[in-house]
Amino acid sequence: MVLGEVRDTEKAITEKYSVTSFPTLIVISGEEKHVYEGGYQHEALTNFFEKYALPGKKSSGNTKEEKKTEKETETCNFLDSTFF
């Protein structure tokens, strides 16, 4: 799972994903996007990530080749400047 953070000042990406409030957590898997709508408690977040994370697999030792063929899931966290 690839994680990323996007600030409210990055208008092009916030508009692309229709983000209107901050923080917003979105998992992007291929063409699908899944917006997290729960509370920010550990168990709820863990359940959300486990639902959309790709299952782990054992490495065959050919890391570069595995990386080329594996489907990636990306997570974006949209934050405004007052979050920190």
Image (tube, rainbow, N blue to C red):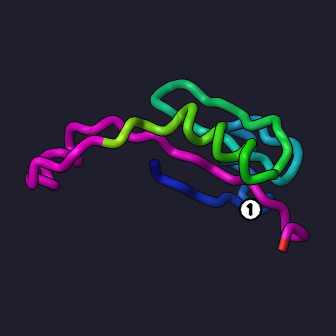
Q: Quick one: which residue is furthest to the top in this view?
A: 32
Q: Position of residue 45 (x, y in %)?
A: 70, 46
Q: Position of residue 36 (x, y in %)?
A: 74, 37
Q: How many marks?
A: 1
- At x 51%, y 45%, the residue is 74
- At x 62%, y 50%, the residue is 76
Q: Position of residue 79 (x, y in %)?
A: 78, 59
> The disc labelled 1 sits on which kind of residue?
Arg
Q: Is residue 49 magenta?
A: no
| Residue at which label 1 appears | 7
Residue 69 horizontal side relative to residue 73, left or right = left
Q: Is residue 71 above or below residue 81?
A: above
Q: Is residue 28 above or below residue 12?
A: above
CA neighbours of label 1 inside 10 A, class few (<14), some (14 to 19), many (20+): some
Residue 34 horizontal side relative to residue 14, left or right = left
- The quadrant of the image that shows the C terminus is bottom right
Q: Quick one: which residue is furthest to the bottom in this view?
A: 84
Q: Could you say whether the residue bearing mark 1 is in a helix, strand or loop? A: strand
Query: 79 or 39, which is in the foreground?
Result: 39
- At x 68%, y 58%, the residue is 6
Q: Position of residue 47 (x, y in %)?
A: 65, 38
Q: Is residue 66 magenta?
A: yes
- At x 55%, y 38%, the residue is 50
Q: Which residues are magenta?
A: 57-83
Residue 52 horizontal side relative to residue 77, left or right = left
Query: 42 or 82, which is in the foreground?
Result: 42
